[in-house]
């Protein structure tokens, strides 16, 4: 896909997020998002599968959060969210490793028997 295409960001993986995610991830309120849409700072698409839902461009939401909270606080919030995702993934991987170790031991016992 062409990077100059105006729809590229909408179709790029991780390029969009829902309004509820923007609330949790960036600490924005619904009023912040509605006001930014009315001021033309945020583009949105309004529904997914017929359900009311604001789909927003991540880059614009990040810029809005940076404007509202300042660069330092925004950077800390972003780092905190990234750390949270990494910890979750590590926990899942540790669990998978533990189950694979158990299976490995069982198979080793079968082979040695």
Image: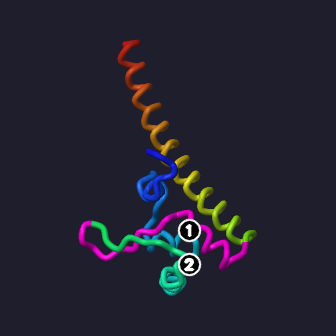
Tell me which label, 2 or 1, sits earlier in the chain.
Answer: 2
Where is residue 59, by image quadrant?
bottom right
Q: Is residue 15 magenta?
A: no
* The image quarter in which residue 69 lies: bottom right
- Judge from the rendering whether residue 76 lies leftward or rightward of residue 104; answer left or right: right
Q: Nearer the viewer, mark 2 or mark 1?
A: 1
Residue for badge 1: 60
At mark 1, the secondary structure is: helix
**Left or right relative to 101: residue 52:** left
Mark count: 2
Of 64 and 43, which appears nearest the observer? 43
The residue shown at (72%, 75%) is 70
Q: Which residues are magenta?
A: 49-70
Residue 60's x, y, as percent? 56, 68
Cα separation, mark 2 vs mark 1, equals 13 Å
Q: Residues within 10 Å of mark 2 (few under 14, many from 20)?
A: some
**Quadrant assignment for the C terminus:** top left
Residue behind mark 2: 28
Horizontal relation, residue 82 to residue 73: left or right: left
- 5 vs 45, nearest the viewer: 5
Q: Residue 20: x percent and y percent?
A: 44, 73
Q: Residue lying farthest right?
A: 72
What kind of element bears circle 2?
Answer: loop
Name the residue rendered at 46%, 53% in the picture.
5
Residue 50 shown in magenta: yes
Q: Position of residue 105 (x, y in %)?
A: 44, 25
């Amino acid at each position: 896909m062409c990077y100059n295409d105006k729809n590229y960001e909408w179709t790029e993986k991780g390029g969009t997020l829902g309004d509820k995610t923007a609330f949790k991830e960036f600490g924005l309120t619904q009023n912040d998002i509605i006001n930014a849409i009315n001021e033309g700072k945020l583009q949105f698409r309004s529904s997914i599968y017929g359900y009311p839902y604001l789909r927003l461009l991540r880059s614009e939401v990040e810029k809005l959060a940076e404007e509202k909270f300042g660069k330092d606080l925004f950077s800390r919030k972003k780092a905190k969210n990234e750390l949270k995702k990494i910890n979750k993934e590590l926990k899942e991987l540790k669990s998978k490793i533990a189950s694979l170790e158990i299976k490995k031991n069982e198979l080793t016992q079968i082979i040695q028997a």
